[in-house]
Image (tube, coloured by chain):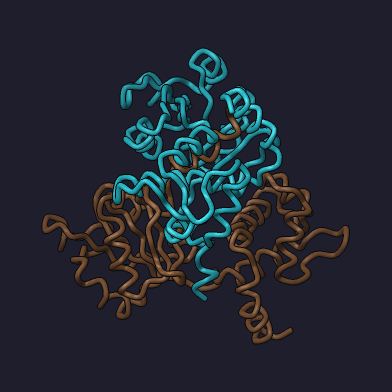
Chain colours: A brown, B cyan
Amino acid sequence: MTDTNNNLFNTELISEVPEVVIQRLPLYVRVLSQFTNMLGGDVISSEQLASHLQMTPAQIRKDLSYFGRFGKQGRGYNVDMLETKLRSILGLDRTWNAAVVGMGRLGRAVVSYPGFSPEGFIINSAFDNSEKIIGKTISGLKVQPISNLTNSVEKLDIKIGIVAVPVGCAQEVIDILVEGGIKSILNYAPLSPKVPDDVVVRGIDPVLSLKSMTYYMR
Amino acid sequence: MTDTNNNLFNTELISEVPEVVIQRLPLYVRVLSQFTNMLGGDVISSEQLASHLQMTPAQIRKDLSYFGRFGKQGRGYNVDMLETKLRSILGLDRTWNAAVVGMGRLGRAVVSYPGFSPEGFIINSAFDNSEKIIGKTISGLKVQPISNLTNSVEKLDIKIGIVAVPVGCAQEVIDILVEGGIKSILNYAPLSPKVPDDVVVRGIDPVLSLKSMTYYMR
Protein backbone atom coordinates (compact mmCIF):
# COMPACT_ATOMS: atom_id res chain seq x y z
CA MET A 1 0.00 0.00 0.00
CA THR A 2 1.44 3.38 -0.97
CA ASP A 3 1.47 6.48 1.21
CA THR A 4 -1.18 8.04 -0.97
CA ASN A 5 -3.47 5.11 -0.38
CA ASN A 6 -2.80 5.31 3.32
CA ASN A 7 -3.81 8.93 3.43
CA LEU A 8 -6.92 8.34 1.40
CA PHE A 9 -7.80 5.44 3.65
CA ASN A 10 -7.41 7.54 6.80
CA THR A 11 -9.35 10.49 5.43
CA GLU A 12 -12.28 8.27 4.61
CA LEU A 13 -12.21 6.85 8.11
CA ILE A 14 -12.21 10.19 9.95
CA SER A 15 -15.95 10.38 10.38
CA GLU A 16 -16.29 6.73 11.37
CA VAL A 17 -13.80 6.49 14.22
CA PRO A 18 -15.37 7.42 17.57
CA GLU A 19 -13.68 10.39 19.24
CA VAL A 20 -13.01 8.34 22.37
CA VAL A 21 -10.86 5.98 20.25
CA ILE A 22 -8.88 8.92 18.83
CA GLN A 23 -8.32 10.18 22.37
CA ARG A 24 -6.84 6.81 23.36
CA LEU A 25 -4.37 6.61 20.46
CA PRO A 26 -1.85 8.97 22.10
CA LEU A 27 -1.96 6.74 25.19
CA TYR A 28 -1.03 3.76 23.02
CA VAL A 29 1.84 5.76 21.53
CA ARG A 30 3.03 6.67 25.02
CA VAL A 31 2.97 3.08 26.28
CA LEU A 32 4.73 1.86 23.12
CA SER A 33 7.60 4.32 23.64
CA GLN A 34 7.74 3.45 27.37
CA PHE A 35 7.93 -0.20 26.35
CA THR A 36 10.79 0.44 23.94
CA ASN A 37 12.70 2.52 26.48
CA MET A 38 12.21 0.21 29.44
CA LEU A 39 12.20 -3.26 28.05
CA GLY A 40 13.61 -2.91 24.59
CA GLY A 41 11.15 -5.52 23.37
CA ASP A 42 10.17 -5.56 19.73
CA VAL A 43 6.79 -7.26 20.15
CA ILE A 44 3.99 -6.25 22.52
CA SER A 45 0.72 -8.08 23.13
CA SER A 46 -2.67 -6.44 23.61
CA GLU A 47 -2.52 -7.91 27.15
CA GLN A 48 0.71 -6.02 27.87
CA LEU A 49 -0.72 -2.79 26.44
CA ALA A 50 -3.91 -3.28 28.46
CA SER A 51 -2.01 -3.72 31.73
CA HIS A 52 -0.82 -0.09 31.47
CA LEU A 53 -4.11 1.40 30.36
CA GLN A 54 -6.82 0.01 32.64
CA MET A 55 -8.47 -1.47 29.58
CA THR A 56 -9.16 -4.98 28.36
CA PRO A 57 -7.06 -6.55 25.57
CA ALA A 58 -10.28 -6.88 23.53
CA GLN A 59 -10.95 -3.13 23.73
CA ILE A 60 -7.43 -2.41 22.51
CA ARG A 61 -7.72 -4.85 19.60
CA LYS A 62 -11.05 -3.27 18.66
CA ASP A 63 -9.64 0.29 18.80
CA LEU A 64 -6.69 -0.62 16.59
CA SER A 65 -8.88 -2.53 14.14
CA TYR A 66 -10.39 0.79 13.00
CA PHE A 67 -7.07 1.52 11.31
CA GLY A 68 -6.28 -1.78 9.68
CA ARG A 69 -4.56 -4.98 10.74
CA PHE A 70 -1.43 -4.39 12.79
CA GLY A 71 -0.77 -7.67 14.54
CA LYS A 72 -0.68 -11.32 13.67
CA GLN A 73 -3.10 -13.58 15.54
CA GLY A 74 -1.39 -14.68 18.75
CA ARG A 75 1.89 -12.98 17.84
CA GLY A 76 1.35 -9.48 19.25
CA TYR A 77 2.23 -6.15 17.64
CA ASN A 78 5.58 -5.02 16.34
CA VAL A 79 6.33 -2.12 18.69
CA ASP A 80 8.19 0.14 16.25
CA MET A 81 5.79 -0.46 13.40
CA LEU A 82 2.70 0.18 15.52
CA GLU A 83 4.17 3.33 17.08
CA THR A 84 5.19 4.72 13.68
CA LYS A 85 1.80 3.95 12.18
CA LEU A 86 -0.13 5.50 15.10
CA ARG A 87 2.07 8.61 14.99
CA SER A 88 1.29 8.97 11.31
CA ILE A 89 -2.47 8.47 11.88
CA LEU A 90 -2.38 11.13 14.61
CA GLY A 91 -0.38 13.58 12.47
CA LEU A 92 2.60 13.40 14.83
CA ASP A 93 5.12 12.94 12.03
CA ARG A 94 5.41 16.72 11.60
CA THR A 95 5.55 19.81 13.85
CA TRP A 96 2.67 22.08 14.86
CA ASN A 97 2.92 25.73 15.90
CA ALA A 98 1.05 26.98 18.94
CA ALA A 99 0.29 30.36 20.51
CA VAL A 100 -0.19 30.92 24.23
CA VAL A 101 -2.77 33.50 25.29
CA GLY A 102 -2.35 34.78 28.84
CA MET A 103 1.18 35.31 30.10
CA GLY A 104 0.54 35.34 33.85
CA ARG A 105 2.00 32.70 36.14
CA LEU A 106 0.32 29.84 34.27
CA GLY A 107 1.21 31.07 30.78
CA ARG A 108 4.83 31.54 31.83
CA ALA A 109 4.90 27.99 33.17
CA VAL A 110 3.47 26.75 29.87
CA VAL A 111 6.03 28.49 27.66
CA SER A 112 8.90 27.33 29.88
CA TYR A 113 7.69 23.69 30.02
CA PRO A 114 10.32 21.62 28.22
CA GLY A 115 7.92 18.81 27.24
CA PHE A 116 6.24 20.38 24.20
CA SER A 117 8.99 20.88 21.62
CA PRO A 118 10.53 17.38 21.71
CA GLU A 119 7.07 16.09 20.79
CA GLY A 120 6.72 18.47 17.85
CA PHE A 121 4.67 21.24 19.46
CA ILE A 122 6.40 24.56 18.94
CA ILE A 123 5.13 27.53 20.94
CA ASN A 124 6.08 30.36 18.60
CA SER A 125 4.06 33.28 19.98
CA ALA A 126 2.59 34.70 23.18
CA PHE A 127 -0.27 37.13 23.72
CA ASP A 128 -1.70 39.10 26.62
CA ASN A 129 -3.94 42.12 27.10
CA SER A 130 -2.01 43.76 29.95
CA GLU A 131 0.07 46.82 29.11
CA LYS A 132 2.48 45.71 31.85
CA ILE A 133 3.31 42.47 30.04
CA ILE A 134 2.99 43.39 26.34
CA GLY A 135 6.40 43.97 24.78
CA LYS A 136 8.30 41.94 27.38
CA THR A 137 10.32 38.95 26.25
CA ILE A 138 9.47 35.76 28.16
CA SER A 139 11.20 32.47 27.38
CA GLY A 140 12.38 34.01 24.13
CA LEU A 141 8.90 35.15 23.02
CA LYS A 142 7.98 38.82 22.72
CA VAL A 143 4.51 39.19 24.24
CA GLN A 144 2.08 40.74 21.75
CA PRO A 145 -1.30 42.38 22.29
CA ILE A 146 -4.27 40.08 21.63
CA SER A 147 -5.31 42.44 18.82
CA ASN A 148 -2.33 41.08 16.84
CA LEU A 149 -3.62 37.53 17.05
CA THR A 150 -5.60 37.26 13.83
CA ASN A 151 -2.71 38.63 11.76
CA SER A 152 -0.23 36.31 13.46
CA VAL A 153 -2.24 33.12 12.92
CA GLU A 154 -1.55 33.15 9.19
CA LYS A 155 1.87 34.81 9.30
CA LEU A 156 3.26 32.40 11.90
CA ASP A 157 1.23 29.37 10.75
CA ILE A 158 -0.33 28.96 14.21
CA LYS A 159 -2.53 25.87 14.40
CA ILE A 160 -3.11 25.53 18.15
CA GLY A 161 -4.24 28.09 20.74
CA ILE A 162 -3.27 27.49 24.37
CA VAL A 163 -5.59 29.36 26.74
CA ALA A 164 -3.96 30.34 30.03
CA VAL A 165 -6.17 33.26 31.04
CA PRO A 166 -8.43 33.56 34.12
CA VAL A 167 -11.78 31.79 33.85
CA GLY A 168 -13.65 35.09 33.64
CA CYS A 169 -12.25 36.01 30.23
CA ALA A 170 -11.62 32.52 28.82
CA GLN A 171 -14.74 32.37 26.63
CA GLU A 172 -13.91 35.78 25.16
CA VAL A 173 -10.33 34.70 24.38
CA ILE A 174 -11.56 31.45 22.86
CA ASP A 175 -13.98 33.42 20.65
CA ILE A 176 -11.03 35.53 19.43
CA LEU A 177 -8.96 32.40 18.68
CA VAL A 178 -11.87 30.86 16.75
CA GLU A 179 -12.46 34.08 14.78
CA GLY A 180 -8.73 34.10 14.01
CA GLY A 181 -9.10 30.69 12.37
CA ILE A 182 -7.78 28.40 15.13
CA LYS A 183 -9.44 24.97 15.11
CA SER A 184 -7.59 23.34 18.04
CA ILE A 185 -7.61 24.75 21.55
CA LEU A 186 -5.86 23.55 24.68
CA ASN A 187 -7.84 25.17 27.50
CA TYR A 188 -6.37 25.53 30.99
CA ALA A 189 -9.30 27.63 32.25
CA PRO A 190 -11.84 25.68 34.32
CA LEU A 191 -14.85 26.17 32.07
CA SER A 192 -16.53 24.36 29.18
CA PRO A 193 -16.47 26.90 26.36
CA LYS A 194 -18.96 27.24 23.56
CA VAL A 195 -17.30 26.69 20.18
CA PRO A 196 -18.40 25.83 16.63
CA ASP A 197 -18.62 22.14 15.70
CA ASP A 198 -15.40 22.21 13.68
CA VAL A 199 -13.27 23.39 16.62
CA VAL A 200 -11.74 20.82 18.98
CA VAL A 201 -11.13 21.80 22.60
CA ARG A 202 -9.17 19.78 25.14
CA GLY A 203 -9.26 20.92 28.73
CA ILE A 204 -6.56 20.64 31.36
CA ASP A 205 -8.34 20.83 34.71
CA PRO A 206 -7.05 18.77 37.62
CA VAL A 207 -10.24 19.37 39.64
CA LEU A 208 -12.33 17.90 36.84
CA SER A 209 -10.06 14.85 36.76
CA LEU A 210 -10.40 14.42 40.53
CA LYS A 211 -14.17 14.60 40.21
CA SER A 212 -14.22 11.72 37.75
CA MET A 213 -12.51 9.49 40.37
CA THR A 214 -14.69 10.16 43.42
CA TYR A 215 -17.52 8.13 41.86
CA TYR A 216 -15.40 5.02 42.42
CA MET A 217 -14.37 6.07 45.95
CA ARG A 218 -17.82 6.38 47.53
CA MET B 1 -37.52 7.37 46.97
CA THR B 2 -35.44 7.52 50.16
CA ASP B 3 -31.74 8.26 50.35
CA THR B 4 -31.11 4.65 51.24
CA ASN B 5 -32.83 3.52 48.10
CA ASN B 6 -30.87 6.02 46.09
CA ASN B 7 -27.61 4.70 47.41
CA LEU B 8 -28.61 1.12 46.79
CA PHE B 9 -29.67 2.06 43.30
CA ASN B 10 -26.36 3.75 42.53
CA THR B 11 -24.28 0.96 44.01
CA GLU B 12 -26.03 -1.60 41.85
CA LEU B 13 -25.39 0.54 38.80
CA ILE B 14 -21.65 1.00 39.33
CA SER B 15 -20.59 -1.92 37.18
CA GLU B 16 -23.07 -1.11 34.42
CA VAL B 17 -22.21 2.53 33.69
CA PRO B 18 -19.40 2.86 31.14
CA GLU B 19 -16.36 4.67 32.48
CA VAL B 20 -16.55 7.21 29.67
CA VAL B 21 -19.98 8.25 30.95
CA ILE B 22 -18.64 8.68 34.49
CA GLN B 23 -15.83 10.82 33.09
CA ARG B 24 -18.37 13.10 31.43
CA LEU B 25 -20.50 13.66 34.55
CA PRO B 26 -18.10 16.27 36.04
CA LEU B 27 -18.33 18.16 32.74
CA TYR B 28 -22.10 18.27 33.08
CA VAL B 29 -21.72 19.55 36.64
CA ARG B 30 -19.36 22.26 35.43
CA VAL B 31 -21.66 23.44 32.65
CA LEU B 32 -24.65 23.42 35.03
CA SER B 33 -22.85 25.70 37.49
CA GLN B 34 -21.64 27.93 34.62
CA PHE B 35 -25.23 28.12 33.45
CA THR B 36 -26.49 29.13 36.90
CA ASN B 37 -23.75 31.73 37.31
CA MET B 38 -24.00 33.25 33.86
CA LEU B 39 -27.63 33.07 32.92
CA GLY B 40 -29.41 32.35 36.16
CA GLY B 41 -31.79 30.06 34.30
CA ASP B 42 -33.57 27.32 36.19
CA VAL B 43 -34.17 24.99 33.24
CA ILE B 44 -31.60 23.76 30.72
CA SER B 45 -32.20 21.65 27.62
CA SER B 46 -30.00 18.82 26.40
CA GLU B 47 -29.39 21.06 23.35
CA GLN B 48 -28.01 23.83 25.58
CA LEU B 49 -25.82 21.36 27.48
CA ALA B 50 -24.60 19.87 24.20
CA SER B 51 -23.58 23.26 22.80
CA HIS B 52 -20.92 23.53 25.53
CA LEU B 53 -19.69 19.96 25.33
CA GLN B 54 -19.15 19.14 21.65
CA MET B 55 -21.70 16.37 22.04
CA THR B 56 -25.15 15.71 20.61
CA PRO B 57 -28.28 16.22 22.73
CA ALA B 58 -29.07 12.51 22.23
CA GLN B 59 -25.71 11.46 23.75
CA ILE B 60 -26.38 13.62 26.79
CA ARG B 61 -29.88 12.24 27.28
CA LYS B 62 -28.48 8.71 27.00
CA ASP B 63 -25.68 9.39 29.53
CA LEU B 64 -28.13 10.83 32.07
CA SER B 65 -30.62 8.01 31.54
CA TYR B 66 -28.18 5.62 33.28
CA PHE B 67 -29.05 7.36 36.53
CA GLY B 68 -32.81 7.68 36.26
CA ARG B 69 -35.22 10.17 34.76
CA PHE B 70 -34.20 13.79 35.35
CA GLY B 71 -36.11 15.80 32.78
CA LYS B 72 -39.64 15.95 31.46
CA GLN B 73 -40.06 15.29 27.74
CA GLY B 74 -39.63 18.60 25.91
CA ARG B 75 -39.27 20.58 29.15
CA GLY B 76 -35.54 20.33 29.81
CA TYR B 77 -33.76 19.69 33.09
CA ASN B 78 -34.10 21.62 36.32
CA VAL B 79 -30.57 23.02 36.70
CA ASP B 80 -30.31 22.93 40.51
CA MET B 81 -31.89 19.51 40.82
CA LEU B 82 -29.69 17.96 38.14
CA GLU B 83 -26.51 19.51 39.53
CA THR B 84 -27.32 18.34 43.08
CA LYS B 85 -28.14 14.84 41.89
CA LEU B 86 -24.99 14.54 39.76
CA ARG B 87 -22.83 15.82 42.63
CA SER B 88 -24.34 13.16 44.85
CA ILE B 89 -23.79 10.41 42.25
CA LEU B 90 -20.16 11.51 41.90
CA GLY B 91 -19.61 11.66 45.67
CA LEU B 92 -19.03 15.42 45.56
CA ASP B 93 -21.34 16.12 48.52
CA ARG B 94 -18.45 15.53 50.95
CA THR B 95 -14.73 16.36 51.16
CA TRP B 96 -11.81 14.12 50.18
CA ASN B 97 -8.26 14.30 51.55
CA ALA B 98 -5.29 14.15 49.22
CA ALA B 99 -1.52 13.81 49.57
CA VAL B 100 0.98 15.30 47.14
CA VAL B 101 4.14 13.29 46.45
CA GLY B 102 7.00 15.33 44.99
CA MET B 103 7.48 18.86 46.27
CA GLY B 104 9.60 20.29 43.47
CA ARG B 105 8.34 23.15 41.30
CA LEU B 106 5.28 21.21 40.14
CA GLY B 107 4.31 19.90 43.60
CA ARG B 108 4.61 23.42 45.04
CA ALA B 109 2.34 24.76 42.29
CA VAL B 110 -0.17 22.00 43.07
CA VAL B 111 -0.34 22.69 46.83
CA SER B 112 -0.64 26.45 46.23
CA TYR B 113 -3.38 26.08 43.58
CA PRO B 114 -6.51 27.66 45.06
CA GLY B 115 -8.96 25.59 42.97
CA PHE B 116 -8.94 22.32 44.94
CA SER B 117 -10.36 23.16 48.37
CA PRO B 118 -13.52 25.05 47.25
CA GLU B 119 -14.46 21.88 45.36
CA GLY B 120 -13.95 19.66 48.40
CA PHE B 121 -10.43 18.37 47.72
CA ILE B 122 -8.24 19.00 50.75
CA ILE B 123 -4.49 18.53 50.31
CA ASN B 124 -3.53 17.63 53.87
CA SER B 125 -0.03 16.21 53.45
CA ALA B 126 3.09 16.48 51.30
CA PHE B 127 5.90 13.99 50.73
CA ASP B 128 9.31 14.02 49.10
CA ASN B 129 12.48 11.94 49.20
CA SER B 130 14.99 14.78 49.16
CA GLU B 131 16.74 15.60 52.45
CA LYS B 132 16.83 19.23 51.28
CA ILE B 133 13.05 19.48 51.22
CA ILE B 134 11.92 17.10 54.00
CA GLY B 135 10.99 19.03 57.16
CA LYS B 136 10.33 22.31 55.34
CA THR B 137 6.87 23.87 55.55
CA ILE B 138 5.38 24.68 52.14
CA SER B 139 1.91 26.24 51.82
CA GLY B 140 1.29 25.25 55.44
CA LEU B 141 2.26 21.58 54.94
CA LYS B 142 5.33 20.07 56.62
CA VAL B 143 7.04 17.93 53.98
CA GLN B 144 7.45 14.34 55.18
CA PRO B 145 9.71 11.55 53.92
CA ILE B 146 7.96 9.08 51.59
CA SER B 147 8.65 6.36 54.16
CA ASN B 148 5.94 8.00 56.33
CA LEU B 149 3.33 7.60 53.63
CA THR B 150 1.75 4.29 54.60
CA ASN B 151 1.29 5.41 58.22
CA SER B 152 -0.18 8.74 57.15
CA VAL B 153 -2.76 7.26 54.76
CA GLU B 154 -4.82 5.85 57.61
CA LYS B 155 -3.99 8.50 60.23
CA LEU B 156 -4.88 11.43 57.93
CA ASP B 157 -7.64 9.59 56.02
CA ILE B 158 -5.88 10.20 52.69
CA LYS B 159 -7.97 8.95 49.77
CA ILE B 160 -6.17 10.49 46.80
CA GLY B 161 -2.49 10.52 45.83
CA ILE B 162 -1.25 13.33 43.60
CA VAL B 163 1.95 12.36 41.81
CA ALA B 164 4.21 15.32 41.00
CA VAL B 165 7.56 13.55 40.71
CA PRO B 166 9.83 13.26 37.64
CA VAL B 167 8.79 10.62 35.11
CA GLY B 168 11.77 8.42 36.02
CA CYS B 169 10.49 7.64 39.53
CA ALA B 170 6.74 7.96 38.94
CA GLN B 171 6.02 4.22 38.68
CA GLU B 172 7.93 3.60 41.92
CA VAL B 173 5.99 6.34 43.74
CA ILE B 174 2.70 5.03 42.37
CA ASP B 175 3.60 1.54 43.62
CA ILE B 176 4.20 3.01 47.10
CA LEU B 177 0.84 4.82 47.02
CA VAL B 178 -0.94 1.61 45.96
CA GLU B 179 0.81 -0.41 48.66
CA GLY B 180 -0.25 2.27 51.15
CA GLY B 181 -3.88 1.64 50.25
CA ILE B 182 -4.56 4.56 47.88
CA LYS B 183 -7.14 3.71 45.19
CA SER B 184 -7.27 7.06 43.35
CA ILE B 185 -4.25 8.68 41.75
CA LEU B 186 -3.92 11.98 39.93
CA ASN B 187 -0.75 11.57 37.89
CA TYR B 188 1.13 14.59 36.52
CA ALA B 189 4.06 12.48 35.26
CA PRO B 190 3.98 11.79 31.51
CA LEU B 191 3.73 8.00 31.69
CA SER B 192 1.00 5.36 31.77
CA PRO B 193 1.64 3.51 35.03
CA LYS B 194 0.89 -0.12 35.77
CA VAL B 195 -1.66 -0.42 38.60
CA PRO B 196 -4.04 -3.09 39.94
CA ASP B 197 -7.58 -3.18 38.50
CA ASP B 198 -9.14 -1.57 41.57
CA VAL B 199 -6.98 1.57 41.36
CA VAL B 200 -8.16 4.50 39.22
CA VAL B 201 -5.55 6.77 37.63
CA ARG B 202 -6.24 10.07 35.90
CA GLY B 203 -3.38 11.72 34.07
CA ILE B 204 -2.71 15.42 33.59
CA ASP B 205 -0.48 15.68 30.55
CA PRO B 206 -0.89 18.63 28.18
CA VAL B 207 1.23 16.96 25.49
CA LEU B 208 -1.10 13.94 25.47
CA SER B 209 -4.07 16.28 25.09
CA LEU B 210 -2.40 18.06 22.18
CA LYS B 211 -1.75 14.73 20.51
CA SER B 212 -5.43 13.84 20.60
CA MET B 213 -6.21 17.00 18.56
CA THR B 214 -3.67 16.70 15.76
CA TYR B 215 -5.69 13.85 14.23
CA TYR B 216 -8.36 16.41 13.32
CA MET B 217 -5.81 18.95 12.08
CA ARG B 218 -4.14 16.88 9.38
Q: Toward the viewer: B181 or A195?
A: A195
Residue A38 at x, y = what percent? 66, 48
The quadrant where residue B105 appears: top left
In the rendered image, which quarter contains the N terminus of chain B?
Answer: top right
Instruction: Identify which residue is drawn at 45% across, 25% down.
Output: B95
Does residue B176 appear left or right of residue A134 in this picture?
A: right
Does residue A156 appear left or right of residue A20 in this picture?
A: left
Does residue A121 appear left or right of residue A173 in this picture?
A: right
The quadrant where residue B66 appears: top right
Q: How many marks?
A: 0
**Visible in this render: residue A29?**
no
Residue B44 at x, y = what percent? 42, 52
Instruction: Identify which residue is drawn at 37% across, 71% down.
Output: A182
B4 to A174, vertically: above or below? above
Q: Toward the viewer: A77 or A65?
A: A65
Instruction: Identify which residue is drawn at 43% across, 67% down.
Output: A184
**Visible in this render: residue B143?**
yes
Instruction: Identify which residue is drawn at 28% across, 68% down.
Output: A176
